[in-house]
């Protein structure tokens, strides 16, 4: 009877051992761990050389982990907090990934959102805009007078004076844009402007703008196929936020005054 148990124990031991691809001071690296790492690196069909290279990386990793523990680094409070934060992130990412798999956005969801967007944009226009941004109104008025008097071109004034460095080097050109993309006061000024004419200084939280609308046209809307990836991303994010809020609403949360 004892011999039978011994044989079974040896068989089990050999079976477990066969699943280990390496041991470091007796600590195993399993075949599953190696395969999982290869999969995460998109090396599912890795060659023998690739498997060995990744295994060597895992061995080096575990050697370094053992040395860190030997030096007591894992006992430091800052390291404990970092490890706990990483653990939480892994759990959260896994939870949300599982949730996403079970709550996929459907083709009907995407089509409905697309149709609503198309309807909301009917009759709206986009504008080809240039602007100069300066800190104070006096400077804006001075530039406006000099441009009107042909002492300097709008493009040169933008290059020399505009504090919006992104558009300044392009002569103030902002390209084609929907007014809704801008600050409200800027967007309103664009829609009220006459094509080709410079506006009076427009105040925003960033300073004063001189604006020229070079052209306007009906908003170019993407096809359903073109819009699908972005709509799917937005709808997924929206549903995920709703999921988080639902969980929060069912959880007792106490926020300390000392935070």
Image: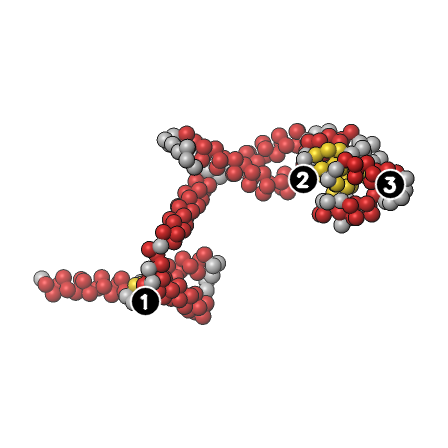
Q: Are marks 1 and 2 in contact (CB under 8 Å)?
A: no
Label 1 crowd (10 A; few <14 / some 14-19 / many >=20): few
Number of marks present in the image shown:
3
Colour pattern of the rendering: secondary structure
Q: Quadrant of the N terminus?
A: bottom left
Q: Residue 253: x and y, percent?
A: 38, 32
Q: Tell me if residue 118 comes above or below residue 85 in the rendering.
A: above
Q: Residue 74: x and y, percent?
A: 35, 56
Q: Residue 18: x and y, percent?
A: 29, 65
Secondary structure at badge 2 equals loop
Q: Tell me if residue 200 comes above or below residue 153 in the rendering.
A: above
241 to the left or right of 231: left
Q: Tell me if residue 2 comes above or below residue 210 in the rendering.
A: below
Secondary structure at badge 1 equals strand
- Depth check: give the residue in front, 188 or 17: 188
Kindly report the distance in space between the C-alpha atoms of the residues bearing marks 3 and 2. 41 Å
As drawn, the label of residue 146 is: 3
- Depth check: give the residue in front, 102 or 200: 200
* Residue furthest to the bottom: 49
Kindly report the distance in space between the C-alpha atoms of the residues bearing marks 1 and 2. 56 Å
Residue at 42% over, 44% down: 92
* Snapshot quadrant of residue 178: top right
Secondary structure at badge 3 equals helix
Question: What residue sits right under mark 2 in the picture?
Answer: 222
Looking at the image, is mark 1 or mark 2 nearer the viewer?
Answer: 1
- Depth check: give the residue in front, 43 or 213: 213
227 to the left or right of 44: right
Residue at 32% over, 63% down: 70
Question: What residue sits right under mark 1 in the picture?
Answer: 24
Pointer 3 or 1: first along the chain: 1
Residue at 86% over, 37% down: 145
């Amino acid at each position: 009877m004892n011999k039978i148990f011994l044989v079974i124990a040896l068989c089990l031991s050999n079976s477990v051992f066969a699943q280990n691809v390496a041991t470091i001071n007796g600590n195993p690296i399993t075949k599953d761990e190696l395969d999982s790492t290869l999969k995460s690196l998109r090396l599912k069909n890795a060659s023998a050389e690739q498997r060995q290279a990744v295994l060597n990386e895992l061995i080096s990793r575990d050697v370094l982990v053992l040395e860190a523990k030997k030096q007591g680094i894992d006992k430091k409070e800052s390291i404990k907090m970092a490890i706990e934060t990483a653990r939480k992130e892994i759990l959260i990412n896994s939870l949300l990934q599982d949730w996403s798999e079970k709550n996929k956005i459907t083709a009907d969801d995407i089509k409905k959102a697309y149709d609503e967007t198309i309807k909301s944009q009917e009759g709206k226009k986009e504008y080809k805009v240039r602007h100069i941004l300066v800190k104070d109104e006096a400077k804006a008025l001075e530039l406006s007078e000099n441009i009107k008097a042909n002492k300097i071109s709008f493009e040169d004034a933008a290059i020399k004076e505009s504090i919006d460095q992104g558009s300044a080097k392009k002569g103030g050109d902002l390209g084609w844009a929907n007014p809704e993309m801008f600050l409200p006061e800027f967007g309103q000024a664009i829609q009220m402007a006459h094509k080709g004419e410079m506006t009076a200084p427009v105040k925003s939280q960033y300073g004063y703008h001189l604006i020229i609308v070079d052209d306007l046209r009906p908003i170019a809307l993407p096809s359903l196929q073109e819009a699908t990836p972005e709509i799917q991303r937005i709808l997924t994010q929206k549903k995920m936020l709703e999921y988080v809020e639902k969980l929060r609403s069912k959880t007792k949360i106490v926020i300390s005054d000392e935070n």
